Image (spheres, rainbow, N blue to C red):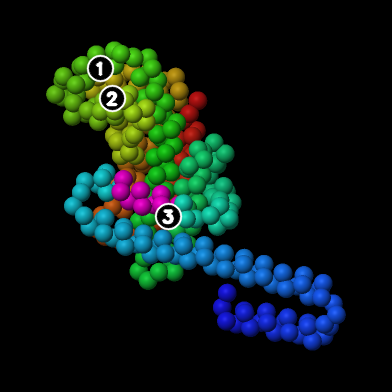
Amino acid sequence: MDEKQALTQEMILEALMNKSNENTDVLEIIWQLLLDIKGNTENISSKLDTVLNKLNSLETDFSDLKNETREIEQKVLLLDSKLNKLEDAISKEELEDYCGMCQGLYNNWDELDSLTKKLIPVAEYLFSKLQKYDKPDYSPVILELCRALENEFLLKIFRKYTFDLISRKGNSLDSFFIKDRATGYLVSKTGQFVKAITKASRTKKPEYTLGQMNTIMSLMNKEDIVYKSPLLQDFRLFLNNKTIVNDLLDIKYIKKINYLVENYRNPAAHPEAMSMQQALKCKEILPGNLDYLINCLI
């Protein structure tokens, strides 16, 4: 509460006391109300200060990380970790209006995962707040939007398949991977897929990036590779049972996801700042890609 607010409260109380010293009950009630207003104001100011400090820190951290010499996927993971900390500082009340707005942008909003329903409003929140900065970098907005799509692909397709395969193969999982691991031609194609599933068999936590998942789906349209890979053949059977596979693997759709990765997600980890126009374009193309994915699920 600033000096002007404090002075106003004192003047109100003084005027009331001068008017009637006898009506103490009323004065006590009014004074308590003023104290409540003061407390609420200070609480709101404290929350705003916390978010503002987090945003300032995020801007510095993003700049430092984006200038490091690392692989793109490592940078994205570190940047995502910074965003997770910021998300914890934003209250549900602050996101309510953004949640309401986002619901009207996605046809399948109710079918999205709870994390996705948080990431998209956070992206919109950041888009609003960053406009108050001088020459802001909109990379956080773009990364949050891409994380939303990544989360849906992970939970609704790749996580389910990974656990399904591990459950079916059990102790024979390594044997199942022999051909994919032994064939040099396949190692360069399916090696990341094999590695992710093998790791998940130990950690019980499947981990894939949006770029990795899109690369795997791209392979599914290359019959010569699928023919040689037991893993891709098995994945194809899973997709046949769980999705409208021809739509999901449609070349045009996969190219759209690749375009999002190559032109927005990956550049967001580069040293150059992402502009408002790039963030706007990413915000424009994400709903269609996300709705399409949900429509492909059985």
What residue is disc 3 on?
A: 86
The kind of residue on which mark 3 rests is Leu
Residue 217 percent coordinates (x, y): 33, 31
Residue nearest the observer in this picture, 29 or 249: 29
Q: Is residue 257 found left or right of 195 in the rendered image?
A: right
Residue 210 percent coordinates (x, y): 34, 39
Q: Is residue 215 found left or right of 16 in the rendered image?
A: left
Disc 1 element: helix
The kind of residue on which mark 2 rests is Thr
What residue is disc 1 on?
A: 174
Q: Are marks 2 and 1 in contact (CB under 8 Å)?
A: yes
Residue 92 percent coordinates (x, y): 56, 52
Image height of 156 relative to 87, above or below: above
Q: Which residues are magenta?
A: 77-87
Residue nearest the observer in this picture, 253 or 262: 262
Separation (CA) of disc 2 from disc 1 = 8 Å
Q: Residues within 10 Å of mark 3 (few under 14, many from 20)?
A: some
Q: Residues within 10 Å of mark 1 (few under 14, many from 20)?
A: few
For the N terminus, give its image quadrant. Answer: bottom right
Pick whichever of labels 3 and 1 is earlier in the sequence. 3
Is residue 86 part of the magenta span, yes or no?
yes
What residue is disc 2 on?
A: 198
Q: Quadrant of residue 64?
A: bottom left
Q: Residue furthest left?
A: 184
Residue 53 percent coordinates (x, y): 42, 64
Pick whichever of labels 3 and 2 is earlier in the sequence. 3
Q: Residue at x 77, y 72 (%)?
A: 28
Residue nearest the observer in this picture, 135 or 167: 167
